[in-house]
Image (cartoon, grey):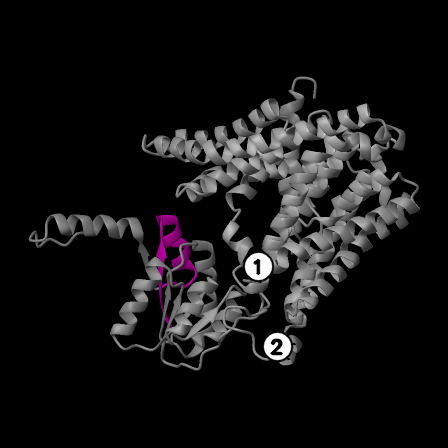
Amino acid sequence: MPHHSPLIATIVVGLVLAFILGALANRLRISPIVGYLLAGICVGPFTPGFVADVSLAPQLAEIGVILLMFGVGLHFSLDDLLSVKLIAIPGAVVQIAFATLLGMGLGWVLGWPVGAGIVFGLALSVASTVVLLRALQERRLVKTERGKIAVGWLIVEDLAMVLALVLLPALAGVIKGDVTVDTLADPVRMSDLLTTLGITLGKVVAFVAIMLAVGRRAIPWLLHYVAHTGSRELFRLSVLAIALGVAYGSAVLFDVSFALGAFFAGMVLAGSELSARAAEETLPLRDAFAVLFFVAVGMLLDPTILVNDFWAVLATFFIIMVGKSIAALVIVLAFRHPLSTALTISASLAQIGEFSFILATLGVSLDLMPERARDLILAGAILSILANLLAFWALDRLRPWLEAREGQPAPGDALASPDVPLGATKLTQHAVLIGAGRVGGVIREALHLQGRPYVVIEENKDVADKLRADGVDTILGPAAPGALIAAANVAGAQWMFIAIPDAFEAGQYAEQARAFNPGIRIVARAHSDAEVEHLQKLGADITIMGEREIARAMVLRAFPDAGVAVTI
């Protein structure tokens, strides 16, 4: 491609291939991350065909790291961590230590220095934020006790890895063995070493102090100022400038990693009421560069390692899937939590991801471990992400046995399969309401005032729990629309109100409901003429377009005595 910029070619081909393979992985019910990593392998130097510019990959990955860590900081909740601190903090520390020891043991077997084994073990000890949250969200476990423990555990792991990223460059000499016993016995050399370490930690402390003392006030103030300009473009740009600027400034002024700088930028911003909007505005760019991060990581993997170094790959996979899981299981059970909670935590942590890649790349760049170790980490990550899906599938299959063993699950903490709805109704001649949000809430109140029997299908666990506490017949999703509709006894219902804003999902409900009950009256909401046409084709009798109804109400409110039918 002589007439094309290597940067453009790398980004375009990487994103296009990541989309294709990510969509294919999602179709096969596999994490799209696997598709992104495979896309990187396909455009890497170890496979035939187009080869992306390998020198650009680390730079693209660095931007991805900055935005990923900024996102982690935005969602960092100290309150959630403190609520489970008694198990999350000691549990994560012990599990990290155990996995590191296992990694050191494998490194010793493979003939690596102790320092290489330490970095290798640390990289295997931390789970992927992206993979864990996806699995918990699919099973509605994020807000449950076991979900909070898993997320809190992960936060502790992330903080430990951030600390490792900061200290590794300063301690590289000690870890590699460049600093010998004679060095430690020499007061001058020992003083130099401690001085270097002290300066590094001092810079980190100074950076953290400035961010907490100044950044916590200055960054939210800046966002509020930009928000009041009314320019969405400037607001979006200000958020990106803060994320990238703080990360770069922290590296230049304080020798702090980009990752730590971005994490603290997000964390101080998380305290602002504009944090949700900031997360929303930057999400597309964060997602795009996160994809490029995984593609760049995949470019570094030589797939022949799966054959040429099979036993080492298998041992690495064993540490991630079995060693970490057993450690987590024993720790949670030791704290007298139910077996279902212990199994959920074990399954949640049985994979590795983004921090492992960052640590592996840093370890190789500092000459702390061989490239073979990085390849083993990358191979272990891909295999563990695939196997993690099977672990959760097995956990879903164990749900009936666990419930029978432990009794019925506590409200709001059910270990539910995403394919099986909870709360099937016995109502007949009733109305079915899909979604109990702002629109659905108004419809529900109207049904209640008219004394009409109704059942609600709701995917938000907190909302569903509140409705049940109020005595409302509620079915908890997500699940396949057909299963939810069957649980709502649509075959015996008179009305269906589809109040969710997603026209694609709403169309599935309408189509399934019409198949179950050809005589049911279906009322749905839409946001465009195309959505109206789509829903009507799939069986909706009445489709209300929000913008049109708002315009109609505005005209009628302005001219209440006009007496003219308003058709908009």
Q: What residue do we see at 40% from left, 73% from top? A: 469
Compared to residue 245, the image places residue 360 above or below, namely below
Residue 501 picture location, percent across and down: 40, 54
Nearer to the camera, 280 or 217: 217
Work out whether residue 394 can be spotted: yes
Q: Which amino acid does label 1 sit on?
A: Val
Q: Residue at x 60, y 49 (%)?
A: 155
Residue 539 falls inside the magenta stretch: yes
Residue sitting nearer the eye, 414 or 323:
323
Instruction: Name above or below for residue 536 compared with residue 257.
Output: below
Q: What stretch is highlighted in magenta?
A: 520-540
Mark 1, Cα crowd under 10 Å, few <14 / some 14-19 / many 20+, is some
Residue found at the far top of this picture: 3
Rendering coords of residue 134 (x, y %): 59, 54
Q: Mark 2 points at which residue?
A: 403
Image side of residue 181 versus residue 10, left or right: right
For label 1, the SS is: loop
Q: Quadrant of residue 375?
A: top right
Residue on which disc 1 sits:
84
User: Farthest left residue?
Assistant: 561
Indicate left or right for 544 with 408 as reference. Answer: left
Q: Residue at x 79, y 46 (%)?
A: 121
Q: Which badge, 2 or 1, comes first in the chain's sequence?
A: 1
How much space separates mark 2 and mark 1, taking CA atoms? Answer: 23 Å
Percent x, y of residue 333: 69, 68
Q: Tell us which disc is closer to us: 2 or 1.
A: 1
Relative to 222, 42 lies left or right: right
Check disc 2 and give the amino acid type: Glu
